[in-house]
Every structure is written in structure tokens, then in C-alpha cells.
Amino acid sequence: MKQIHITRSNNIVTFETVSVDNTETVFFTNDDPQAAHWPTITSNQLGPAPSANSSQCSVPTAAGPYQYGCKIAGHENESGTINVFLQLAAGTTTLPQATVNSAIAPAQVVVGGVAPYQISGQQFQIVDSGNNIIQQGSNSIGPGMSLTPGENGIWASGTPTVVGTYNFTFTVNDSEARNLQQVQYSMSVVAA
């Protein structure tokens, strides 16, 4: 849940801008002693106010900036923005089968959240068809493979250099202090 403050300074009402994921609710708090501001989103009233200076709403589920404003006489031009983004989550967890020493098409392994992303705790293990460990390590998702953060998520890409099943995991933190960890990813790599 995020709280948006409505304030007044030099007789100008200001709505605080917030960023939320699409599973959260927004709680408006009116800190302006001169008026009861009941915000609206896309022309729909947010609902009954729980108290004389607050109102709560669910945010839209689609990503994007949403305008909200006041429907009080004399305050029609006052508005703010709620930036809605998708919840930080795993994307593709089983990558398409790859061929050793051939580049793979980038696979989006993390979706949602807000860039920039920080990746840590990378660990991998490669096993053969008998589930015997061939190679393992940290600070990587496997030989020839890497993670690339972008504006809307993280992609796995590269050229795998070992035949076997790559199993890997990593931790992601986004700029909104959200965290994703303990997701298991895999990719089968076959001989040419």
C-alpha cells in the first residue's frame, strides 16, 4: 500500500506522485486543512472516505501512468499521477533447448518491477543426462551465458559452451526495493 499526500503551499494544492505495482492499493491523505479533496481516477470516484481526510482505492491492473484529480468546485485543475508497473516476477523459467556453441535467442527471465535492476547471488549447476554434476559455480548463470537488465525486465542470453542441463538462480532487486529470489531456471543444451 502506498500513501499519497495532498498538501497546500502558497495556496497551491499538490498531489504527491507515487509508483506502485498493480497489486497494491493507494491511500490518499488530505493534509490540506482548507478543503476536503476526494480524488478520482479516470472519472470514477475512489469510494467512500474512511475518515474526514482520507480515501482508499485499488489501482488499475495495467501498467502505465494514471492521472487522478479533484472533483471539488474551484479545484478541478488539480491532479497528480500514479505510475503503475507490473509486479516483479519470474518470466520464462524453462528456456528453449539450445545447441552447444550456438547463440541463443534472448529469453526474458524477469518481468515487471521498475528499472534499474540489481542482480546478485548468481549460481549455476550443469548436469548430464544421468543427473551427474558436470560443472557448478557462482557469479554466473553458466559458461557462455549472462543476464542483461533492460528497461522492462532481465534477459538471459549468450552462447552455451557445455552440453547438459543448465540449472541456475539469482536474486533481483528493483528500484522500488522489491525483491525476487529462489526462482529456479533451466535450459537443456545439446551437442551440435
Image (cartoon, grey):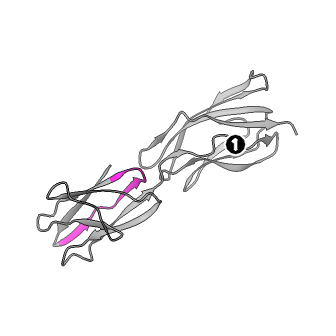
Give the residues drawn in magenta, as a range.
12-25
Coordinates of residue 67 in the picture (x, y in percent): 36, 68
Relative to residue 59, is residue 129 drawn left or right? right
Mark count: 1
Residue pictured at 59% horizontal, 46% vertical: 91
Residue pictured at 47% horizontal, 60% vertical: 62
- Which quadrant holds the C terminus? top right
Residue 121: image quadrant is: top right
- Magenta portion: prevailing SS class: strand
Compared with residue 107, is residue 184 higher up or lower down, i.e. above or below? Answer: above
Compared with residue 47, is residue 118 higher up or lower down, i.e. above or below? Answer: above
Compared with residue 82, is residue 192 higher up or lower down, i.e. above or below? Answer: above
Relative to residue 72, is residue 59 drawn left or right? right
Residue 55: image quadrant is: bottom left
Coordinates of residue 187 in the picture (x, y in percent): 71, 38
Relative to residue 55, is residue 42 drawn left or right? right
Compare residues 89 and 159 and report the one nearer the observer: 89
Amino acid type indicated by mark 1: Leu
Location of mark 1 (residue): 95
Relative to residue 120, is residue 189 drawn left or right? right
Residue 46: image quadrant is: bottom left
Compare residues 65 and 11 and report the one nearer the observer: 65
Residue 163 belongs to the span the image colors magenta:
no
Coordinates of residue 131 in the picture (x, y in percent): 74, 23
Coordinates of residue 32 in the picture (x, y in percent): 15, 64
In the picture as drawn, the residue positioned furthest to the right comes out as 192
Secondary structure category for the residue under label 1 = loop
